[in-house]
Image (cartoon, rainbow, N blue to C red):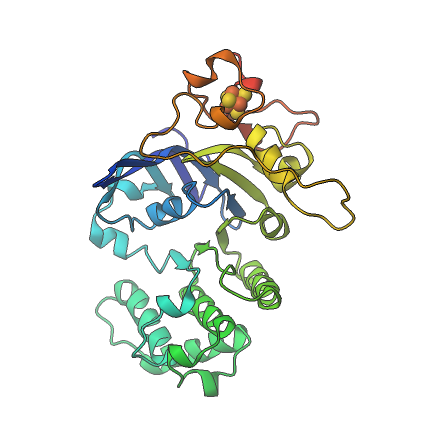
Amino acid sequence: MEQQRGDLLDISGLRVVFNTYAGQVKALNGVELWMNHGERLGVVGETGCGKSVTALSVMRLIEEPGEITSGALWFEGRNLAQLSENDLNSIRGKDIAMIFQEPVAALNPVMKVGAQIVENIECQRRSADAGQIPDKRAFSEIMRDMLGRVGLDWQRTENLYPHELSGGMAQRVMIAMALSSKPKLLIADEPTSALDVTIQAQILNLLNKLVRETQTAVLLITHAMGVAAQFCDFIAVMYAGNVVEYGSVQSIFRNPLHPYTKGLLNAVPKIGRTDELQSIPGIVPDLIDPPSGCRFHPRCPYRKPDCDTLEPTLRAAKTEPAADRHHVACFLYQNDA
Ligand code: SF4
């Protein structure tokens, strides 16, 4: 393998398709992104751009009719795309954990919350402590400690069923469960979009505090640029199955390069802003028959003559001042078209 670009995760040339009756959906078209231990990377873009498919690919949870057709998913030097189910099971939930948009749906409806967290800890420890008798009392202590750390009264919460939890409580339980195994990477797929705005802020602040304490890296999937700016160190902007721009939060917000990123930022309302919000003209393309060349070309106000035939790749951008890891996939900054 070439040198891994991030010492934790390096996704390279990832392609995923879904074979449906209507045709083959080319959901990911060579995704590139990477991150180091302890970093927080926000993946942003419109609905259907491939954010969640990227997250599920890292967990190797793409199910039929979907399949990973090519690319590599390097995690601490091991290619997740090529690991056996057994090897993957020793990483899933332990080294890489995930929280979902609908926390209640992700919990077992017929099992009390405390028992679910204990079962999860037991599962993660089974491979590490093979041959030893599981210490259920110690697991219960961890469960209670985690419920306390996410701000819940463990004495009450451990005996509740998922349907007895509010949305905010359920997401706290999911965070407790995910962090109980001390993962190196937490994938948070729109963790606050199903919650009220005030609860969203509480959950983000809580997540922020806990992952800083534990030095856990976070891959945050969100459609909100503001959430990514507040929470993350780096941002990857996705459009129609590609990462079109990648860089530090400061460089993306101060000096956006890709026309799509500029469009997204122009559409964000701000306090004190008096001009009209700008929408991006056109609609998200059909990924069964995506546009040729640059997938953004039908909506791009800056398109060049070859943009509809040649595909730009994600390359380091020369910016003034020089910015950490700023990459862009656009011919305005490359000389190929
Ligand atoms: Fe626009 Fe061409 Fe850049 Fe695509 S490659 S974003 S069409 S200028």
- Asked if residue 4 shows in the view, the reply is no
Q: Is residue 121 above or below residue 286?
A: below
Apparent side of residue 132 relative to residue 55 in the rendered image (left or right): left
Q: Position of residue 310 (x, y in %)?
A: 42, 16
Apparent side of residue 265 relative to residue 169 in the rendered image (left or right): right
Q: Camera-side residue: 201 or 36? A: 201
Q: Please report the residue visible at 60 percent of the width from the left and 67 percent of the height from the top.
A: 202
Q: Camera-side residue: 48 or 218? A: 48
* Total residue callouts: 0
Q: Quadrant of residue 17?
A: top left
Q: Is residue 78 above or below residue 302?
A: below
Apparent side of residue 263 relative to residue 112 in the rendered image (left or right): right
Q: Position of residue 331 (x, y in %)?
A: 52, 18
Q: Position of residue 177 (x, y in %)?
A: 41, 69
Q: Quadrant of the N terminus?
A: top left
Q: Quadrant of residue 187?
A: bottom left
Q: Please report the residue visible at 41 percent of the width from the left and 16 percent of the height from the top.
A: 309
Q: Is residue 30 above or below residue 42?
A: above
Q: Please report the residue visible at 41 percent of the width from the left and 31 percent of the height from the top.
A: 3
- Asked if residue 1 shows in the view, the reply is yes
Q: Position of residue 287 (x, y in %)?
A: 35, 35
Q: Is residue 322 above or below residue 24?
A: above
